[in-house]
Image (spheres, rainbow, N blue to C red):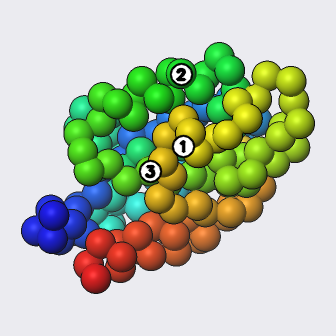
């Protein structure tokens, strides 16, 4: 596991799942790829398939429709797969938490290793969160 984490710390491939968000978080994630923030300079890149990813980035809330899909995507990920929850939605449900169709225990759907809070979080906060992840992987 140690060597695997060291490899991840150099180049993290990320797959993003948008699970019923309001889309603000998704727009901020896209900002990370623009020349202004240029996330790829850290060796971090978004990939088009969960089967190629080391990290699953989840934004939005898990409702009864999307929850099983997110679970299915997580099951297809090569393990270990680190899950990062973007925004307040995956952490606490945010403004959707009392909705009738929200899965009651979000943590039963997939394990989330790191939360980046905010509604939506700023790109700078997301970069700081990902740097924290790299530090944890290097420890
Ligand atoms: S955390 Fe806020 S900005 Fe992000 S998807 Fe949820 S409601 Fe939207």
User: Can residue 34 be seen from the camera position used here?
Assistant: no
Q: Is residue 124 left or right of residue 121?
A: left
Q: Is residue 5 left or right of residue 81?
A: left
Q: Is residue 21 above or below residue 6?
A: above
The residue mark sitting in front, 1 or 2, is: 2
Residue 98, label in figure: none
Pointer 3 residue Cβ closer than 8 Å to ligand 1: no
Q: Secondary structure at mark 3?
A: strand
**Mark 2 lies on residue:** 68
Q: Secondary structure at mark 2?
A: helix
Q: Real-space Cα distance between discs 1 and 2?
A: 14 Å
Q: Quadrant of residue 51?
A: top left
Residue 73 location in percent, x, y?
A: 40, 28
Q: Quadrant of residue 133?
A: bottom left
Q: Identify the residue at image location x=25%, y=69%.
A: 9
Crowding at mark 2 (Cα within 10 Å: few <14, some 14-19, many 20+): some
Residue 41 location in percent, x, y?
A: 32, 66
Q: Tell me which label, 1 or 3, sits earlier in the chain.
A: 1
**Mark 1 lies on residue:** 58
**Mark 3 lies on residue:** 83
Q: Quadrant of the C terminus?
A: bottom left
Q: Tell me which label, 3 or 2, sits earlier in the chain.
A: 2
Residue 55 location in percent, x, y?
A: 36, 50
Q: Quadrant of the N terminus?
A: bottom left
- In the image, 8 versus 112, the foreground residue is 112
Q: Is residue 42 above or below residue 19?
A: below
C-beta proximity under 8 Å, tags 1 and 3: yes
């Amino acid at each position: 596991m140690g060597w695997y984490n060291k490899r991840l710390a150099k180049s993290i491939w990320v797959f993003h799942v948008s699970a019923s968000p309001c889309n603000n978080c998704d727009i901020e994630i896209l900002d990370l790829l623009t020349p202004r923030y240029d996330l790829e300079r850290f060796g971090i890149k978004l990939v088009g398939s969960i089967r190629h990813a080391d990290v699953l980035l989840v934004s939005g809330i898990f409702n009864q429709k999307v929850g099983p899909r997110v679970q299915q995507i997580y099951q297809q990920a090569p393990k270990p797969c680190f899950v990062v929850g973007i925004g307040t939605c995956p952490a606490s449900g945010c403004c959707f938490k009392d909705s009738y169709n929200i899965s009651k225990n979000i943590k039963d759907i997939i394990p989330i290793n790191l939360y980046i809070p905010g509604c939506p979080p700023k790109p700078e906060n997301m970069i700081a969160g990902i740097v924290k992840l790299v530090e944890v992987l290097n420890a």
